[in-house]
Amino acid sequence: MSHSEDYQPDRRPITSRDKKISKRAATWLIRRRVTPNAISVVGMVAGLAAGIVLALTADSPYAPALFITAAVLMQLRLLANMLDGMVAVESGVASPVGELFNEVPDRVSDTAMFIGAGYAFGSDPAIGYVAACLALFVAYLRAQGKVAGAHQEFCGPMAKPQRVFVVTILALLSGLLPSAWQQQITSVAVWDRSGGLMAWGLVLVILGTALTAIRRLQRIARALRKEAT
């Protein structure tokens, strides 16, 4: 989503954007002259912090609390991602660098979140790096589709909101479920590190993101062919 009213037709569809509480939050921020770019930066900081906290769970006696903290930070990141566009549209503020502030913080947040999840308790770094690379790739496809002359393609099944949702749920389960339950759930895990919940969840993200990349490519190609006729 851009920081411009003219960009509304090409915004990511978010149902919670239409809720009264979301609109009130956006209005509250506008009245206090909080800029969309500042909100984007807050979201990025939350995403970076979530990745760091996830990585800290690997060798910490406070892993359950850290997992829950990471879940809260990831949702704060999504909230900021929603509110920056709402504030931009409702206030009519269009920043010359708004597009950069909209896209770059998201890529930083995605990378930090998945790499951190790869180093988390019950996970594997290699899987985290693969998930991060695929997240960057599907975002690249969306942006490249627009550059090529098609609309931005936000389809899933593992778009940004779904990716963050899955990792949030994994963090909550890792923080709240007893270790014995987690070991039973992941009893077929082949990773050496104890646990396995986060690793299996990241595999799900990888498979879903790969399917998302294929679907986006197909839709963008279809739109470009239609434009050419």
Image (cartoon, grey):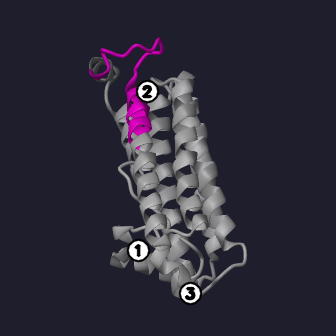
Q: Nearer the viewer, residue 104 or 66?
A: 104
Residue 211 drawn at (x, y percent): 39, 43
- In the image, is residue 177 part of the stretch drawn in magenta? no
Residue 206, image quadrant = top left
**Which quadrant of the figure has residue 205?**
top left
* The label number, if any, that marks residue 53 in the structure image: none
In percent of width and height, residue 2 lies at: 57, 73
Callout 1: helix, strand or loop?
A: helix
Residue type marked 3: Ser
User: What residue is shown at x 48% (from left), y 15% (from top)?
Assistant: 193
Q: Nearer the viewer, mark 1 or mark 2?
A: 2
Residue 136 screen position, x and y as percent: 58, 47
Query: Magenta span has 199?
Result: yes
Q: Which residue is rendered at x = 59% and y = 56% of the image?
A: 106
| Marker disc for residue 22 | 1
Magenta residues? 185-208
128 or 207, which lies in front?
207
For the C terminus, give its image quadrant: bottom left
Question: How far separated are the C-alphas under marks 3 and 1?
Answer: 14 Å
User: How far apart are the two marked residues, 2 and 3, measured between alpha carbons?
Assistant: 42 Å
Q: Residue tagged by mark 3?
A: 91
**Residue at image point 52% right, 64% down:** 81
What numbered label is drawn on residue 199? 2
Dot 2 amino acid type: Ala
Q: Earlier in the sequence, mark 1 or mark 2?
A: 1
